[in-house]
Image (spheres, rainbow, N blue to C red):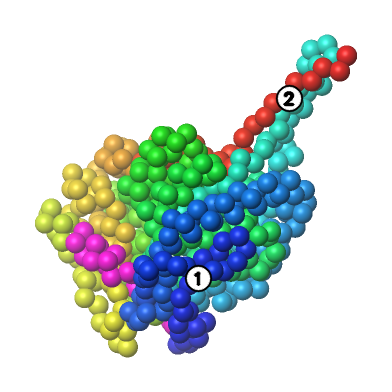
Amino acid sequence: MTLLPEVKKHYGRLRLLIGGEWVESRSPKIQQTTNPATGEVIAEFPEATPEEARAAVEAAARAFEDWKDVCLRDRARLLFDLRAKLEERFGELTRILVQDHGRTIGEAEGSVRRVIENVESACSAAYGLVKMNEHLDQLATGIDQWLVWEPLGPFLIVTPGNIPMHAWSSFVPYALAAGCTVVVSPSRQDPVAADAITRAAAEVGFPPGVINLIHGGRHINTHILEQPEIQGVGFIGSTAAGWDLFRLCGQLGKRSSLNGNGKNHVVVMPDADYDQVAQWLLRSCFGMGGQRCLGSDNVVVIGDRYDELKEKFVAAASSLRLGYGLDTSTDLGPMCTPQGREKVLQWIERALGEGAAMVLDGRSPAVPGYEGGYFLGPTILENGHPDMATAREEAFGPVAVLMRARDLDEALEWINTRTNYGHSACLFTESGRTARRFTREAQVGNIGINVAIPQPYAFFPLGSKKESFLGMAKSRMASMRLFLDEKTVTARWT
């Protein structure tokens, strides 16, 4: 066991970044954020005033007038410098993420690595603008025509509580590569993590106002989006909040990329390696405390080996060690907030009331030394059925529900018709024919074949479907279409 040191015990009162200056908010509304493993307060943060939000928008608008004209190689150089800064701060950022969110140090390292990959991808996207532009000589006699992509202006970026740094990187570097500026509004669940990555970016030397940070929540998000200079929003969070932003963008005529909830399935075929599947399911169902949009809680078992899989899965889950994520021997950290923990407990109770049966009960785990933490142990239910409400709503906690299906036809029918969400679906099999059919027929945006989490690399979009995504451009590399607009030029010189 190695207990890594906390970067700080307490981070004080967080500030706002407006126009290149870290300023104290004048808001009387101050909230606290806690370490999920201990329940201890680690920072205070303000709910920004409308005037402060307006100042951030004005700063972003002023900065855009110069930033859009910064030459491509200079924008790219700053993004490369950002990558170097994140590598330099890698250990610090991972430990802050553990302390503020609750995940394990290994999960935090993976998340910050995804952040760096997004910055690398944004560098590629910047240089890729050359290939996006098109030119045609002699379209007609003496007439040339060409297409150029231009940055739109300032954007609102809203990040969620489960992936505060990764979500930041799914939009911000691409906006900067495109020549846009941003006002970032992070979740109130883990503001220290958002503050830390913003501070790292601010040290790189981006011009004042290119990146701005405002704490506040839905009220402030709406206010920012309503400002005329803001061109649209990049958002990862709940579908309910996404729908509100989508409707507002429609009313205002603004662009959006809105990533919401999921209800993901893992399908286990009888030819799969069940020893390996049991280990994969640990990550799929319990990784990051189950608080990930590409995780799964519906485990659909096909064939007559159900009892074998249940036994192996329960044995593997029972071996997971709960604790503080800065302890390198910890396998499963706490939930991010006590409210999130309570929602999962209520979800489990509803599932039991709908006919599910408890197989492994993680509702009251003992975690010596961390009695104030927001812990839930791995929980496995069985007798799941797609007619249950809980089979259509994500638990968003360390929960797995075992379900029996007659065959792949039935499993696909459940995935495609019994939920309005379409983030991901995974299949465990040794059959290429079965895998190919599943890949083609499952109506979700991210498919996994013998992988626990079908996480696309940064230069692929998060290809979610149905109510898991609303808007006109997916996140990551695909968000370049959010931040850019086409202009065609037709010229005659004869």
* Image coordinates for residue 214, horizontal then vertical, percent: 48, 60
Observer-nearest of 458 and 317: 458
Observer-nearest of 412 and 222: 222
Boundaries of the magenta span: 325-348
Residue 307 lies left or right of residue 133; in this view the side is left
Report the quarter where the N terminus lies: bottom left
Q: Magenta segment: does it hold 334?
A: yes
Residue 192 lies left or right of residue 58; in this view the side is left
- Disc 1 designates what residue? 24
1 or 2: mark nearer the eye:
1
Judging from the image, what secondary structure is the residue with disc 2 in? strand
Name which residue lies at 45% across and 67% down.
26
Q: Magenta segment: does it hold 141?
A: no
| Distance in Å between CA atoms under marks 1 and 2 | 47 Å
Outermost residue on the top side: it is: 141
- Disc 2 designates what residue? 489
Q: Amino acid at mark 1?
A: Glu
Q: Amino acid at mark 2?
A: Val
* Image coordinates for residue 449, horizontal then vertical, percent: 45, 49
